[in-house]
Amino acid sequence: MVKTLRAVDFRCWTELALDMPDSGGIFVGPNAQGKTSILEAVCVLLRLQSPRTHKMASMVRRSTSGFGIAGDVQDLRRKVRCGAGGMVCEVDEETRATSSEYLVDSGLVVWMGNEDLELIRDGGERRRRYLDFIGFQWDPGYRRNWSRYRRALKMKNALLKERHQDEKQIAAYEEIMVESGEGLAMARAAMIDALQPLAAAAQAAVSGTAEHLLIAYRPAGSMDMRTELRQSHERERRTRQSVTGPHRDDLVLTVNGLDACEFASEGQQRTLALSLKLAQGALLEARSGVPPVYLLDDIFGELDGKRRNALMNALPVDAQKLITTTTLDWLKEDPAYQQIPRFRVNEGKVGLF
């Protein structure tokens, strides 16, 4: 659990200081006041990444050179600084040399927002990001394989675009892609197998019906990447880009046997998006033995009362929940959550109601 949060020059916040209750908090205020940025700061502090952007520099407050985030997480004091010189991470005043070293004893996170509908409606990149966000927290080797694969892929694509392609260099990068890519594919397949029953149970709970949800792994090729690269050799030289590998993987999502993107109603799609995130939380809790921090960004206004109540009942009772909202009208229907402390966020200030 996050006990305190401090941020300087992060997004719209010149300075932010909060003491976080164990149960969490509800942050209330108009749009564009920095509520979402509070949740984002928690995510960066715990996971060194944001669900809103891939670029750390985009989170630096305008006209400043960098941001800092600090907080007490369980019994450890964590700090993240980002500036022109890159990122510096500290735990209890000791610098951690790599992201992996910083993350090894950090907290886990589930982010839920209206943009989760993109998991169902958008292309495969959005679903790969969902898998990666889980994978970085679920498997210590996942980040290493992902980083090595992405670097090798970038270099290979650059070589493929050259007028005179250096096959020896391309082959060297393909060796890295085979090793790290197969590691990624195996981790994703295992992760999806574990997610399937959790997501199906969440779908039934949130929908209140006997809807059958199926999640299936759709790799870009076979699990034998070396063979795939050999078979796609001529095509890649012709198109001058990599056409097979985990960077093209996808998830198949069906409800009652029908493609969720094409045939599910909007209500079913929203339920499915919620179920995927609830399954993520259950998977991470099963892996670590403690519930992750749930960051719920202004999702209740888009849910009907039935789904909203079902979601709130499905969240772990002992998990810390940080919630943003523009109105508290929905809270009247959820008496169990009326005890969570409420914070007013407005004009660069945040304080208890």
Image: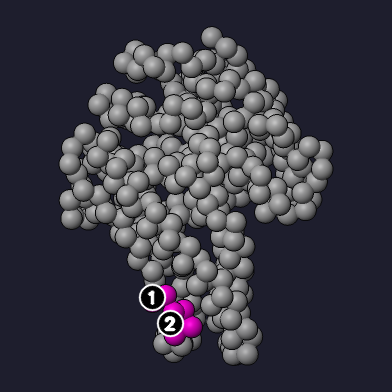
Is the C-beta separation of discs 2 and 1 under 8 Å?
A: yes
Q: Earlier in the sequence, mark 2 or mark 1?
A: 1
What amino acid is found at the position of numbered circle 2 in the picture? Glu
Residue at the image point whose x is 53% and y is 37% from the top = 290
The image shows residue 13 at horizontal and vertical percentages of 65, 28
The image shows residue 98 at horizontal and vertical percentages of 73, 54
Residue at the image point whose x is 43% and y is 61% from the top = 190
The image shows residue 309 at horizontal and vertical percentages of 31, 25
Q: Is residue 5 left or right of residue 252?
A: right
- Quarter holding the N terminus is top right
Q: State the extent of the magenta-drawn residues as a range.
A: 222-229
On the question of residue 251 being in view, the answer is yes
> Quarter-wise, where is residue 90 in the image?
top right
In the displayed structure, 72 sits above or below 90; it is above
In the displayed structure, 228 sits above or below 28; it is below
Q: Is residue 331 left or right of residue 95?
A: left
Disc 2: which residue: 228
State whether the magenta stretch is mostly helix, strand or loop: helix
Residue furthest out toward the right: 94
- Circle 1 SS class: loop
Task: Examine the structure image and report whether residue 228 is included in the region drawn in magenta.
Answer: yes
Foreground residue among 263 and 95: 95
- Circle 2 SS class: helix
